[in-house]
Image: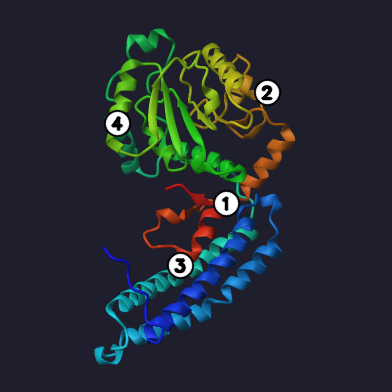
């Protein structure tokens, strides 16, 4: 297919198209200037600078609106009034008109998103009360999905090893944990580049839930049949970067490749859980987040009154129960938590996930500390 011809310089379409593209180029330049400010962690942001840079962008909104108005008026003229433009000119003209209309439609949403970066109020990483299920239908669907993913009973292989069966974590409570970890990740870097690991993943349902937030999710599972079931389930789901490894978590030595690790009592005894904690802490890299609920109330093992075995994780800084940071000081962990509490709980879509072409908005959407890996 041949490239579209350059519009004639004398035609109305050519002149208006040139003006529109010049205006969008200026908006892109201004968005690129603001983007680094949005990417800063909360404690390093300059509210005055963000407001000033945004005001320079917002000042061009009336001009872009007027450009769209003129383009719409031209589009409604009788055909004989538009003889000066070629068919290629008209196609380019209409495409640009549609793009401007879409970008103007989300202007207010982008404005609200930018404001949340300098008007942020601390919000707890995990709410004081997290329900197990939203309603009976959600409870039924969660149980059904868990059964579809892994419909078999625990084998002698897993039981003799001291492992629990594939126990479901209520979805809203797992979501609360994973969203807290995601906000902590946003405060530190780029979650799309981070790797999540589920120790004792069973059928792999939680890997799918975590994939909404992190770029690569891997399950570690001891039972052979659970591994086979998880592989089938994840293949049916069809998302990229979802996999499961057949391994013994108590001797696994590759924890260092993960940025976030989750486990919910994969071992029956506290002695084996302590062995697991020691193995994990010894092998992860500094800054790794460990999500380790000991019960359905999301308490860590160290807080449970009925355990007599000391917890290695309790020697690591606790960001919020039951999330620990390995290899950082308490001072670093406290600053990390404060930055994460100032991230938003309403994620912003990445530019590439939008149905429309984001154009000049792309730098702001991708730089936002609240960007969502959907």
Q: Taking 174 as reference, is 5 left or right?
A: left
Q: Which residue is mark 2?
A: 315
Q: Examine the rendering and report whether any part of residue 60 can be seen.
A: yes
Res 158 quadrant in image: top left
Question: Which one is earlier in the sequence, the residue at label 4 or at label 2?
Answer: 4
**Which residue occupies the foreground of this view, 263 or 188?**
188
Residue that appears at 60% across and 21% down: 281
Q: CA distance from mark 1 to mark 4?
A: 32 Å
Q: Examine the rendering and report whether any part of residue 179 can be seen.
A: no
Q: Which residue is mark 4?
A: 233
- Residue 106 badge: 3
> Marks 4 and 2: CB-CB under 8 Å?
no
Q: CA distance from mark 1 to mark 2?
A: 30 Å
Question: Which one is earlier in the sequence, the residue at label 3 or at label 4?
Answer: 3
Q: Position of residue 78 (x, y in %)?
A: 26, 90
Please tell me how crowded label 3 is: few (under 14), some (14-19), or many (20+) other residues with Cα within 10 Å.
few
Q: CA distance from mark 4 to mark 2?
A: 37 Å
Question: Is 237 above or below relative to 256?
Answer: below
Q: Position of residue 348 (x, y in %)?
A: 49, 55
Question: Which one is earlier in the sequence, the residue at label 1 or at label 3?
Answer: 3
Question: Which one is earlier in the sequence, the residue at label 1 or at label 2?
Answer: 2
> Which image quarter is the N terminus in?
bottom left
Q: Residue at the far top: name it.
A: 160
> Marks 3 and 4: CB-CB under 8 Å?
no
Please tell me how crowded label 4 is: few (under 14), some (14-19), or many (20+) other residues with Cα within 10 Å.
some
Please tell me how crowded label 1 is: few (under 14), some (14-19), or many (20+) other residues with Cα within 10 Å.
many
Label 3 residue SS: loop
Q: Position of residue 152 (x, y in %)?
A: 28, 20
Q: Position of residue 283 (x, y in %)?
A: 58, 20
Residue that appears at 47% across and 83% down: 66
Q: Which residue is mark 1?
A: 369
**Which residue occupies the foreground of this view, 298 or 46?**
46
């Amino acid at each position: 297919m041949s490239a579209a011809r350059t519009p004639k310089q004398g035609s109305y379409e050519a002149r208006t198209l040139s003006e529109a593209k010049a205006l969008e180029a200026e908006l892109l330049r201004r968005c690129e200037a603001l983007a680094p400010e949005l990417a800063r962690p909360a404690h390093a942001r300059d509210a005055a600078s963000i407001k000033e840079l945004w005001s320079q962008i917002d000042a061009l909104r009336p001009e872009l609106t007027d450009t769209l108005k003129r383009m719409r008026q031209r589009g409604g003229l009788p055909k004989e009034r538009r003889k000066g433009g070629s068919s290629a000119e008209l196609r380019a003209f209409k495409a640009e008109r549609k793009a401007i209309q879409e970008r103007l439609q989300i202007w207010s949403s982008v404005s609200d998103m930018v404001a949340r970066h300098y008007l942020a109020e601390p919000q707890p990483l995990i709410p004081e009360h997290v329900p197990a299920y939203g309603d009976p239908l959600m409870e039924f669907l969660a149980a059904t999905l868990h059964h579809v993913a892994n419909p078999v009973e625990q084998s002698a292989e897993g039981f003799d090893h001291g492992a629990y069966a594939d126990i479901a974590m209520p979805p809203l409570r797992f979501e609360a944990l994973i969203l807290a970890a995601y906000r902590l990740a946003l405060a530190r870097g780029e979650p799309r580049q981070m790797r999540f690991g589920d120790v004792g993943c069973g059928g792999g349902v939680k890997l799918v839930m975590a994939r909404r937030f992190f770029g690569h999710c891997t399950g570690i599972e001891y039972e052979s049949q659970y591994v086979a079931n998880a592989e089938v389930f994840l293949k049916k789901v069809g998302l990229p970067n979802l996999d499961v490894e057949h391994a013994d978590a108590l001797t696994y030595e590759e924890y260092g490749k993960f940025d976030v690790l989750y486990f919910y009592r994969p071992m029956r005894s506290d002695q084996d859980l302590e062995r697991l904690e020691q193995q994990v802490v010894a092998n992860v890299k500094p800054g790794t987040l460990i999500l380790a609920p000991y019960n359905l109330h999301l308490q860590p093992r160290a807080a449970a009154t009925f355990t007599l075995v000391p917890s290695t994780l309790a020697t690591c800084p606790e960001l919020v129960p039951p999330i620990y940071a390995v290899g950082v000081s308490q001072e670093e962990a406290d600053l990390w938590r404060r930055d994460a509490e100032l991230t938003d709980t309403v994620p912003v879509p990445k530019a590439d996930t939008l149905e429309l072409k984001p154009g000049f908005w792309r730098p702001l959407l991708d730089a936002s500390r609240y960007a969502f890996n959907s």
